[in-house]
Image (cartoon, rainbow, N blue to C red):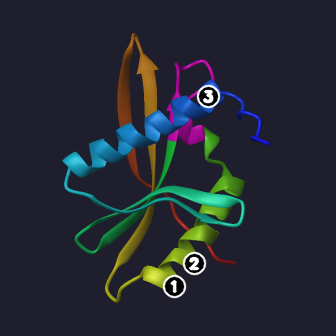
């Protein structure tokens, strides 16, 4: 018996994936090498892990259809930062190299008047240990 067809993808999910693809191309055009896409540990993931020289950036991509819900960087609160940081630490332990420098970036992909605009926020947050 054949499996029932899967439901059509959520348009928000499709839009988000398209934003991630644009962010990847944008970073590659600026000399970054993509090490991983959607690196997942459990239920948490990092959208992009990229390298340029000794700098490794863990990148969260936030796609927006406009400014109605605020900038994408505001959607990366402390809980999301903590989750990304935990996944990044696992990646670092598995794949990191001596001498690497690590940071957390956010790329906002904003759809404005039919054209997407990308904003790269380097070093968007830092880990604080208590």
Query: From the viewer's perspective, is 106 left or right of 8?
Result: left
Marks 3 and 2, the one that precedes in the sequence:
3
Q: Residue lying furthest bottom in this view?
A: 98
* Quarter that holds the C terminus: bottom right
Q: How many marks?
A: 3
Marks 1 and 3, the one that precedes in the sequence:
3
Kindly identify the residue that appears in the image at 67 percent across and 60 percent down.
Answer: 44
Q: Which residue is mark 1?
A: 93
Query: From the viewer's perspective, is 89 left or right of 105?
Result: right
**Whole-percent x, y for residue 100 in the image:** 34, 80
As drawn, 129 above or below 81: below
Secondary structure of residue under mark 1: helix
The numbered dot on residue 109 is: none
**Whole-percent x, y for residue 116 in the image:** 37, 24
User: CB under 8 Å between callouts 2 and 1?
Assistant: yes
Distance, label 2 to label 1, CA atoms, is 5 Å
Q: Which residue is mark 3?
A: 12
Distance, label 3 to label 2, CA atoms, is 28 Å
Query: From the viewer's perspective, is 100 left or right of 111?
Result: left
Which range is magenta?
62-74
Q: Nearer the viewer, residue 2 or 50?
A: 2
Specify few, some or many for label 1: CA neighbours under 10 Å numbering under 14, 14-19, or 20 or more: few
Q: Nearer the viewer, residue 130 or 47?
A: 47
Q: Nearer the viewer, mark 1 or mark 3?
A: 3
Q: Which image quadrant for residue 78?
A: bottom right
Q: Nearer the viewer, mark 3 or mark 2?
A: 3
Distance, label 1 to label 3, CA atoms, is 33 Å
In the image, is residue 16 part of the stretch drawn in magenta? no
Q: Which residue is mark 2?
A: 90
């Amino acid at each position: 018996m054949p499996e029932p067809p899967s439901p059509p993808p959520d348009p928000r999910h499709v839009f988000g994936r398209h934003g991630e693809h644009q962010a990847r191309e944008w970073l590659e055009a600026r000399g970054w090498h993509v090490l991983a896409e959607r690196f997942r540990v459990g239920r948490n993931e990092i959208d992009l892990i990229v390298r340029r020289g000794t700098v490794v950036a863990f990148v969260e991509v936030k796609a927006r259809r406009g400014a109605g819900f605020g900038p994408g960087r505001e959607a990366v609160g402390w809980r999301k930062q903590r989750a990304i940081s935990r996944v990044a630490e696992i990646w670092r332990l598995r794949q990191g190299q001596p001498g690497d420098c690590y940071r957390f970036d956010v790329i906002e992909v904003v759809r404005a008047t039919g054209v997407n605009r990308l904003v790269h926020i380097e070093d968007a947050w830092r880990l604080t240990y208590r």
